[in-house]
């Protein structure tokens, strides 16, 4: 797994554990259901990530009885993990705007400062505008009817996301104007 994907997975896990303690299967299930990008991740990726966070003191583990004579390990965010999550959200890189990372960052927007949310939203919008330009260029040079239709559909999907982002940016700018120094719940 690339360092960037590992960072996104760690951010997602920290964000989920910020909400509530979870066991490994529960984490994987929430990663899959709420952040569909993580369908490609296996326990082979998740558990090494959890072990790294345990070693760093970002999470703790506690045995919990299941009621069937078995125990499972429940993971909880520590104060150090809380601070690390806050730090990760403050270190916005261009990767936060790409297809793999944007959903994770967006899911954690309630914990981020307004200026960071705006930077990510604008960055995502810029990436999509570039993609839309490329799609339109390819669309104009497509002879095959079905391929042209697929590209047209792709362009419309990108246009919808840009429109959605425009609304979010406008809302965020209005909120920032009302209380410019208002941080998210972690700040």
Image: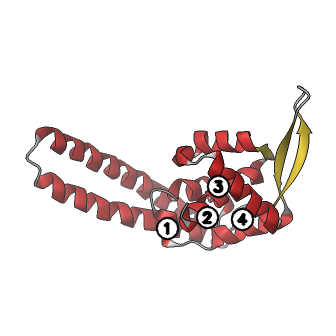
> Residue at coordinates 23% horizontally, 61% vertically from top-left?
134
Q: Which residue is at the far front?
A: 44
Secondary structure at numbered mark 4: helix
Q: Which residue is mark 4?
A: 85
Calculate the distance from the C-alpha at mark 1 to the C-alpha at mark 2. 10 Å
Q: Nearer the viewer, mark 3 or mark 2?
A: 2
Secondary structure at numbered mark 1: helix
Q: Which residue is at the far left?
A: 143
Q: Position of residue 6 (x, y in %)?
A: 60, 62
Secondary structure at numbered mark 2: helix
Q: Which residue is mark 1?
A: 95
| Of the image marks 3 and 4, the number of the one nearer the N terminus | 3
Q: Nearer the viewer, mark 2 or mark 4?
A: 2
Q: Quadrant of residue 11?
A: bottom right
| Of the image marks 3 and 2, the number of the one nearer the N terminus | 2
Q: Which residue is mark 2?
A: 7
Q: Quadrant of the N terminus?
A: bottom right
Q: Is residue 73 above or below residue 50?
A: above
Q: Quadrant of residue 186?
A: bottom right
Q: In this rendering, would 150 be left or right of 20?
A: left
Calculate the distance from the C-alpha at mark 4 to the C-alpha at mark 1. 17 Å
Q: Is residue 14 visible?
A: no
Asked if marks 1 and 2 touch (Cβ < 8 Å), the reply is yes
Q: Which residue is mark 3?
A: 12
Calculate the distance from the C-alpha at mark 2 to the C-alpha at mark 4. 11 Å
Q: How is the image coloured?
A: secondary structure
User: Looking at this view, is 43 or 177 the one in front?
Assistant: 43
Q: Is residue 139 above or below residue 116?
A: above
Q: Quadrant of the C terminus?
A: bottom right
């Amino acid at each position: 797994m690339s360092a960037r994907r590992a960072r996104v997975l760690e951010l997602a896990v920290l964000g989920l554990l910020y909400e509530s303690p979870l066991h490994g299967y529960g984490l994987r299930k929430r990663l899959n259901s709420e952040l569909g990008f993580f369908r490609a991740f296996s326990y082979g990726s998740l558990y090494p990530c959890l072990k790294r966070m345990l070693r760093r003191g970002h999470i703790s583990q506690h045995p919990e009885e299941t009621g069937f004579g078995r125990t499972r390990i429940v993971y909880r965010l520590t104060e150090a993990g809380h601070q690390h999550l806050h730090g990760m959200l403050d270190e916005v890189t261009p990767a936060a705007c790409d297809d793999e990372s944007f959903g994770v960052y967006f899911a954690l927007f309630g914990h981020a400062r307004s200026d960071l949310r705006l930077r990510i939203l604008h960055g995502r919008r810029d990436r999509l505008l570039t993609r839309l330009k490329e799609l339109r260029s390819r669309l104009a040079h497509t002879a095959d009817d079905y391929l042209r239709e697929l590209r047209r559909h792709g362009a419309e999907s990108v246009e919808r996301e840009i429109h959605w982002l425009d609304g979010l940016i406008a809302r965020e700018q209005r909120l920032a104007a009302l209380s410019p120094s208002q941080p998210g719940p972690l700040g």
